[in-house]
Image (cartoon, rainbow, N blue to C red):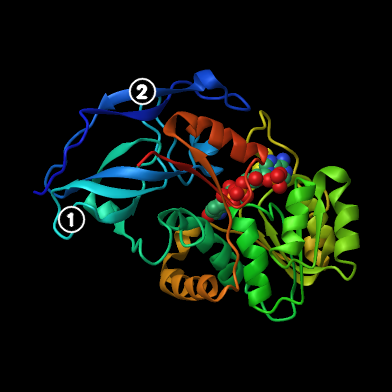
Amino acid sequence: MAEQPVPATAREWHLKARPNGWPVATDVALVEAPVRLPEPGEILVRNAYLSVDPYMRGRMNDVKSYAPPYQLDRPMDGGAVGYVAASAAEGFEVGDAVLHGQGWREYATVQAAHAVKVDASKAPLSYFLGVLGMPGLTAYAGLVSVAGIKPGDVVFVSGAAGAVGSLVGQIARLKGASRVVGSAGSAAKVAKLVDDYGFDAAFNYKEGPVREQLAKAAPEGIDVYFDNVGGEHLEAAIGALGVHGRAVLCGAIAQYNETAPSPGPRNLVQAIGKRLRIEGMLVGDHAALQPQFTAEVAGWLTDGGLRYDETSVEGIERMMDAFLGLMRGENTGKMVVRLAS
Ligand SMILES: NC(=O)c1ccc[n+]([C@@H]2O[C@H](COP(=O)([O-])OP(=O)(O)OC[C@H]3O[C@@H](n4cnc5c(N)ncnc54)[C@H](OP(=O)(O)O)[C@@H]3O)[C@@H](O)[C@H]2O)c1
């Protein structure tokens, strides 16, 4: 087993209480804990970037879902990339860059079978948490596999300046959409959608009813709606979808911090007459698309066809700020936490 000096202890975030509505500072704690050296089949990773993602809010609740709830007084987890600091697993050497699922901590002792080596010479390491990672595959699979995007489609995406949404709009264009429309929560984000990401139209959902703003941005209606938000956005999109329109239900961030369930779209009955297909998706079901996704998206990044932004917060002590900032819309593109090297 090859090793390099590692600290005896390192910091990790624990869930201390289950939030009611928006999480507060006392729901979590940054704890100093012993670093466990790897046993056979394991590696020790010094994390370099940690991911904060909206689904983590659901895991703070004690409810049965597709991802298990975080346990109280235990470290939270999530996507992370870092460097192998010690290895007791065949095929992993000290210094290898890896992607794994034990984020929210500085050092992680990981089953090698649950880590994937990534090529840090091909792209910045943090990209494997974003455009070349889970959010990128979500955007790609949602459009290609779930929506079945076709040339000429008019596509509307909400949360359009975020990690998934910014890629949805651009991939839609690359796949031949005739018009791409996005909504986001600030004037700067709306400008970015049009100026940098090539959207045909964009609007700030905080400035007026989504239904009215969408009607102006897509006067002929839409063929595909990629839903990151739920609520009012979904209702407006159902109204704008044409016959045989498709809606991909990817996320409903407008509802994640609600304390009571919100009513469903009041116009769902339109799905009958318009023969809409409204389909939920989970990225985990689309692992088979990974090679095609990686090849196509890496190509677009190289030839400049795809723009990618990150918002980086420095230091593990600010990780909860980064998570809450993500929920409040302080990010453009993927929100990541960078740890000191
Ligand atoms: N189904 C899956 O497998 C899967 C996988 C990944 C992500 N997702 C979902 O996809 C969505 C986007 O995830 P992401 O990682 O790319 O996050 P993100 O879009 O980078 O960040 C979240 C964004 O949501 C927006 N937002 C917050 N509250 C809102 C509200 N009330 N109404 C409208 N927008 C609001 C904020 O932007 P503004 O400034 O524009 O408000 C914020 O920047 C989330 O719903 C997430 O749960 C699903």
- Tag 2 secondary structure: strand
Query: Image quadrant of residue 69?
Result: top left
> Residue sitting at 62 percent across and 74 percent down?
148
The residue beneath circle 2 is 31
Judge left or right: residue 283 versus residue 94: right
Judge left or right: residue 31 versus residue 223: left
The numbered mark, 1 or 2, whose residue comes first in the sequence reads 2
Tell which of 168 and 321 is nearer to you.
Answer: 321
> Mark 1 is on which residue type?
Glu
State the mark number for residue 93: 1
Residue 60 in view, yes or no: no
Q: Nearer the viewer, mark 1 or mark 2?
A: 1
The quadrant of the image that shows the C terminus is: top left
Residue found at the very far top of the displayed protein: 26
Q: CA distance from mark 1 to mark 2?
A: 28 Å
Against 55, residue 97 (above or below) is below
Q: Position of residue 55 (x, y in %)?
A: 53, 43
Q: Position of residue 338 (x, y in %)?
A: 44, 42
> Residue sitting at 52 percent across and 39 percent down?
313
Against 218, residue 208 (above or below) is above
Q: Residues within 10 Å of mark 1 (few under 14, many from 20)?
A: some
Residue labelled 1 has its Cβ within 8 Å of some atom of ligand 1: no
> Mark 2 is on which residue type?
Val
Tell which of 316 and 145 is nearer to you.
Answer: 316
Judge left or right: residue 323 versus residue 216: left
Query: Image quadrant of residue 98?
Result: bottom left
Confirm or deny contact between disc 1 and disc 2 (CB under 8 A).
no
